[in-house]
Amino acid sequence: MRDVNQEATDAPAPITDRDSDPWWEALYAGQLKLPHCLDCGATWFPPTPGCPECGGIHVELIASTGRGHLYSWVVINRALGQNVPRDTPYTIVAVDTEEGARMIGRLFAPSDQPMRAGEPLSAVIRSVRGQTVVGFERAIS
Amino acid sequence: MTDDRRRASFLGRTALVGVGFTEFSRDSGRSVLSLAAEACRRAIEDAGLPRSDIDGVVSFSVLDDSVASQAVATVLGLPELTYVLDMNLGGQAPSFMVMQAAMAVDAGLADAIVIFRALNGRSGTRVGSTEFHGPAGQYRYPIGFSAYPQYIAMWARRYMIETGATYEDLGAVAIAQRAYAQANDRAVIRGALTPESYLASPFVADPFRGPDCTTEVDGACALVVTTLDRARDLRHSPAVVRGAAYVLGNRSGLDIGDALLWKDYSRNYTSLLAKALWASAGLGPTEIDFAELYDCFSSTVLFGLEGLGFVGRGEAGGFVRAGNTALGGRLPTNTNGGLLCEGYLHGMNTVAEAVLQIQGRSGERQVPRANSCVVTSGGMMDGSALVLTRA
């Protein structure tokens, strides 16, 4: 496995807001959380001040197992934009978590095995060049 | 969207009557205001209307990349406006902008409105790779998920997973449109593209290679909208606004680059607005002669063909590979080479090409039978569409 801290990235810091601050604070404390609706039971991502399923306002953050399945992915072959990682190629995965949220993240443990939709992945929280981010590792390595 | 929606009153009573372009380039060396004014001036002249008859201006911009309609009205010396609208939207806007102008002239708020899109999209702010300051940006940019080709590639990959579509299906779109571009002097990408040269092109964001992606340009494009009654007396035959729809789907996200809450990456807004669009026009896909489908990337053409019901699920790639979207095919599509080749005016030029075709003014690439067409604007969670016909 590559040491992500040695990857040449200069990723920007997240511009957080009042709706997302508790989620980031949990992440900085090493906990992956997801917004959850106390009215209808939906769980989603990213944090919002109302439930996208029922419009309910009783939203709390719950712990996520971090386990999920691969929904889609893209291999970034060419860095696009200013202040973006230059360590191409890298892979961004879209993952549906067990709790029902879709998340995106860097694939932290690439392997030569072909990617397969539905394959299991696990979330990991890493510090990359000083930025704490969510990524995913493949169960298949 | 309810099925028993009342038919919008402007449909069948309004028309597009004039088209204006500037040159498309990689570095205009001019102000956006100068570009906007030139395109609007040309569109008004093309319509055959005196400048003094224009009493409305409508435009859109993203990331503050354009100029206010007020400024354009001033530069054009328009005497007095009764309708002005500047919208903060991306590629979902052009057909929607036609709807706004058509509503306004039909409602009597204005008589003739010039609508435009102008930007130094290549030498200035490049929308494909500039950060949007929306609330969801904090989840994208720190991980290097930073640009539109990457976002739409994520959808294209899911579409390939679900339908079995291949790289060759994406390539077929790019190849078909490149053939049209060779007959379009305005197109900035005109070199020959073959299946071999397509597959030899490096990936930008796998599954997208360079030819799957639009090319950002500097330039402007404008159209004139007026009532059908007024349009009948003008220089060119009117392109009648026969059908129209806009939709913003459920869970459409927090900003225009955010698809985290969107459930199905293999379908976009075209699937959601098709029924309302066809009902509004009183026409169906089999009655449409050609299509101008928003193509920031090749995959959105496949999404549009399926979403609007021209082909069944997973059939779009085969439809394109069989030549159906070429000139002389069942449904000539993106007859200017599309945004892939003509350049990225955020789909304003997609509408303009539809008008030129309906008016029979597309020269070498003119579709032989061009009585009716569909136009779409947008690639992801929301978008707009028109059905245009000859009078």
Image (spheres, coloured by chain):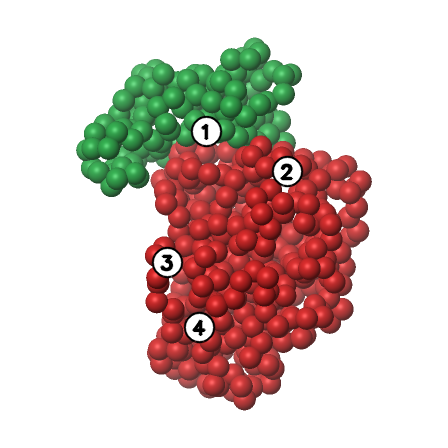
Within-10-Å neighbours for mark 1: few <14, some 14–19, many 20+: many
Q: Position of residue B232 (x, y in %)?
A: 53, 86
Q: Mark 2 belongs to which subunit?
A: B
* Nearer to me, B6 or B198: B6
Q: Are marks 2 and 3 on the same chain?
A: yes
Q: Position of residue B327 (x, y in %)?
A: 73, 61
Q: Mark 4 belongs to which subunit?
A: B
Callout 2, which amino acid?
Answer: Ala
Within-10-Å neighbours for mark 4: few <14, some 14–19, many 20+: many
Residue at the (69%, 63%) spot, across then down: B186
* Marks 4 and 1, how far apart at CA: 42 Å
Q: Mark 1 belongs to which subunit?
A: A
* Marks 2 and 3, how far apart at CA: 31 Å
Q: Report the residue marked by disc 3.
A: B3
Please, is residue B244 above or below residue A4 in the view? below
Residue B123 visible at all: no
* Marks 2 and 1, how far apart at CA: 23 Å
Please, is residue B186 above or below residue A100 in the view? below
Q: Report the residue marked by disc 2.
A: B165
Callout 4, which amino acid?
Answer: Leu
Q: Give the label, 1 or 3, closer to the camera.
A: 3
Within-10-Å neighbours for mark 3: few <14, some 14–19, many 20+: few
Chain letter tied to green? A
Q: Quadrant of the C terminus of chain B?
A: bottom right
- Residue A140: image quadrant is top right
Q: Are marks 2 and 1 on the same chain?
A: no
Q: Give the label, 2 or 3, closer to the camera.
A: 3
* Label of residue B11 in the image: 4
Callout 3, which amino acid?
Answer: Asp
* Horizontal relation, residue B347 to residue B81: left or right: right
